[in-house]
Image (spheres, rainbow, N blue to C red):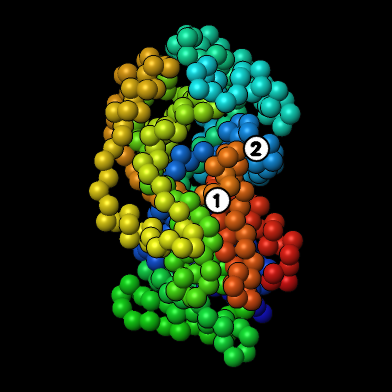
C-alpha cells in the first residue's frame, strides 16, 4: 500500500485525497487552517465554467465543456442552476466581436442564443454590441465542503486540520519524510512517504523553498470580489460582459447574494515568484497588507454598460490571493500546473485555475501512473 501526504485542504486537495484513497493508498490530508476550503476554494466567483469564458483559448474552453456535465452530475446538490446566464459582447476595448463569439460557441458546442428583449432593454446599445443567452451555473462552496468532508470520512482519509507542512526531504530509503507543525503546538516528523502532493495554490513555492527545491514560476494577484444585491429586475440572472477589461456578476449561493468582479479593478496589484527575486509568502502578505475596496470604480464602470446597475447595493468585499501560470496572461488560458517529481522523486506540485480543472489533474496523475 502506497503512503501519500496531500498538502492543502482546498477542493483540489480534498478531491485528490479521496481519489487516491479509493485507489488503495493510505492518505493523510494536511490543512494549515482549522477548516477546509477557506481560501481560494471559497473566495472566487463560484462559477461552474461551460467554456464561454475562454474564446481566446479554445483548448481551455473545450476542457470546460467536457468537465461541466461531469461536475454538475457529481456535485448536483451543490450546484445552483436556477438562474439565466447571459454573455454580452462589448463594443469598446473588446477583444472579440459578436460574430466571433457566436462562431466560437458553435465550435465548442456550447448553447448560445440571442437574449430576449427583457434583458437587452437594460443594456446601453452604444457600448454593448450583442447579448446571448447561455448555460452556466454556480456552486455553493459551503455545501461542496460539507459534501467533501463526508466523502473523505467514507474514504478513510486521515484529515489533519490546523496542520502546516513545513518541508519535505528524502530519506535514506529513497522515500520522503515531512515535517508537520501543529497549530496547537509541537511538530511531527512523518517518515516513509511514497508520495507528497503539494496542492497549496498560492503557497506552492513556500514548501519548495523550505525544502531546498527550485521555485515554480507563478503570478500572484491580490484580488477583491464584491458581494452585492443586484436590482430586483435582474434577480435570477448572471451576466458576463466580455472579452476585455469588463465585468461579471453571478449568483453567490453560499451567501444568497451576487458576486461582482471586474477585470480592471478586481486585481489590485501583482507579484511574481521567480528566481532572482525575494520570495513573498502569500498568506503572510495577505494578513499584513491593508485592503482598500475598489467597489466604487467597479460600480461606476459597470453602470455605463447596464445603467440599471446604478441601483446595486454593496454588501462587503471578500479578498484572496489569486495565482495563475504566467503564460495564461497572453490568452486567458487556464491549464493546470502539474509537475511530477519536482526536485524530488515522489514530490509533485499541482494547481488549477478553476474548479473543474480538478478532473484534468486527476487524469494526468492516472495517465502517468504515479500511484499504480
Q: Residue at x 33, y 72 (%)?
A: 183
The 10 Å Cα crowd at callout 2, few under 14, some 14 to 19, many 20 or more, is some
Which of the two residues, 204 or 131, is positioned nearer the viewer here?
204
User: As drawn, which residue projects farthest toward the front?
Assistant: 276
- In the picture, the quarter occupied by the C terminus is bottom right
- Residue 155, picture quadrant: bottom right
Q: Residue furthest bottom?
A: 172
Q: Residues within 10 Å of mark 1 (few under 14, many from 20)?
A: many
The label number, if any, that marks residue 325 in the structure image? 1
- The residue shown at (62%, 78%) is 194
Is 68 on the left or on the right of 232, as rendered?
right
Between residues 50 and 90, which one lies in front from this camera angle?
90
Horizontal relation, residue 261 to residue 357: left or right: left
Q: Earlier in the sequence, mark 1 or mark 2?
A: 2
Judged left or right of residue 312, residue 331 is: right
Q: Which residue is mark 2?
A: 57
The residue sitting at 35% across, 46% down in the picture is: 319
- Work out whether 268 lies above or below 349: above
Q: CA distance from mark 1 to mark 2?
A: 14 Å
| Image x and y of residue 137, in percent | 54, 34
Figure check: 82 above or below 44: above
Q: Residue at x 65, y 41 (%)?
A: 60
Percent x, y of residue 253: 43, 38
- Please, is residue 244 above or below residue 187 in the view? above
- The numbered mark at residue 188 is none
Image coords of residue 311 (percent x, y): 31, 19
Give the quadrant of the N terminus: bottom right
Disc 1 secondary structure class: loop
Amino acid at each position: 500500500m502506497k503512503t501519500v501526504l496531500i498538502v492543502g485542504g482546498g477542493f483540489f486537495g480534498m478531491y485528490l485525497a479521496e481519489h487516491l484513497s479509493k485507489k488503495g493508498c493510505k492518505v493523510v490530508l494536511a490543512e494549515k487552517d482549522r477548516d477546509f476550503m477557506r481560501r481560494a476554494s471559497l473566495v472566487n466567483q463560484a462559477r461552474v465554467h461551460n467554456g464561454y469564458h475562454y474564446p481566446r483559448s479554445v483548448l481551455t474552453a473545450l476542457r470546460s465543456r467536457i468537465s461541466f456535465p461531469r461536475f454538475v452530475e457529481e456535485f448536483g446538490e451543490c450546484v445552483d442552476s436556477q438562474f439565466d446566464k447571459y454573455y454580452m459582447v462589448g463594443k469598446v476595448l473588446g477583444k472579440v466581436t459578436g460574430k466571433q463569439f457566436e462562431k466560437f460557441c458553435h465550435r465548442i458546442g456550447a448553447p448560445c442564443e440571442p437574449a430576449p428583449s427583457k434583458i437587452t432593454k437594460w443594456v446601453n446599445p452604444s457600448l454593448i454590441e450583442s447579448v446571448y443567452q447561455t448555460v452556466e451555473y454556480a456552486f455553493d462552496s459551503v455545501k461542496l465542503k460539507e459534501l467533501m468532508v463526508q466523502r473523505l470520512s467514507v474514504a478513510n482519509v486521515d484529515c489533519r486540520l490546523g496542520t502546516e507542512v513545513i518541508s519535505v526531504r528524502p530519506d535514506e530509503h529513497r522515500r520522503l519524510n515531512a515535517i508537520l507543525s501543529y497549530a496547537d503546538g509541537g511538530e511531527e516528523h512523518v517518515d516513509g512517504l511514497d508520495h507528497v502532493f503539494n496542492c497549496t495554490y498560492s503557497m506552492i513555492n513556500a514548501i519548495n523553498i523550505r525544502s531546498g527545491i527550485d521555485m515554480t514560476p507563478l503570478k500572484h494577484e491580490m484580488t477583491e470580489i464584491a458581494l452585492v444585491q443586484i436590482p430586483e429586475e435582474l434577480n435570477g440572472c448572471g451576466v458576463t460582459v466580455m472579452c476585455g477589461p469588463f465585468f461579471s456578476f453571478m449568483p453567490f449561493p453560499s451567501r444568497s447574494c451576487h458576486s461582482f468582479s471586474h477585470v480592471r479593478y478586481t486585481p489590485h496589484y501583482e507579484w511574481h515568484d521567480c528566481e532572482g527575486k525575494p520570495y513573498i509568502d502569500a498568506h503572510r502578505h495577505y494578513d499584513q497588507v491593508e485592503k482598500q475596496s475598489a467597489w466604487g470604480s467597479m460600480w461606476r464602470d459597470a453602470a455605463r454598460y447596464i445603467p440599471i446597475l446604478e441601483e446595486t447595493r454593496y454588501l462587503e468585499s471578500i479578498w484572496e490571493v489569486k495565482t495563475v501560470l504566467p503564460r495564461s496572461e497572453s490568452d486567458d488560458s487556464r491549464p493546470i500546473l502539474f509537475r511530477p517529481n519536482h526536485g524530488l522523486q515522489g514530490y509533485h506540485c499541482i494547481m488549477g485555475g478553476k474548479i473543474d480543472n480538478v478532473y484534468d489533474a486527476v487524469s494526468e496523475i492516472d495517465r502517468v501512473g504515479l500511484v499504480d
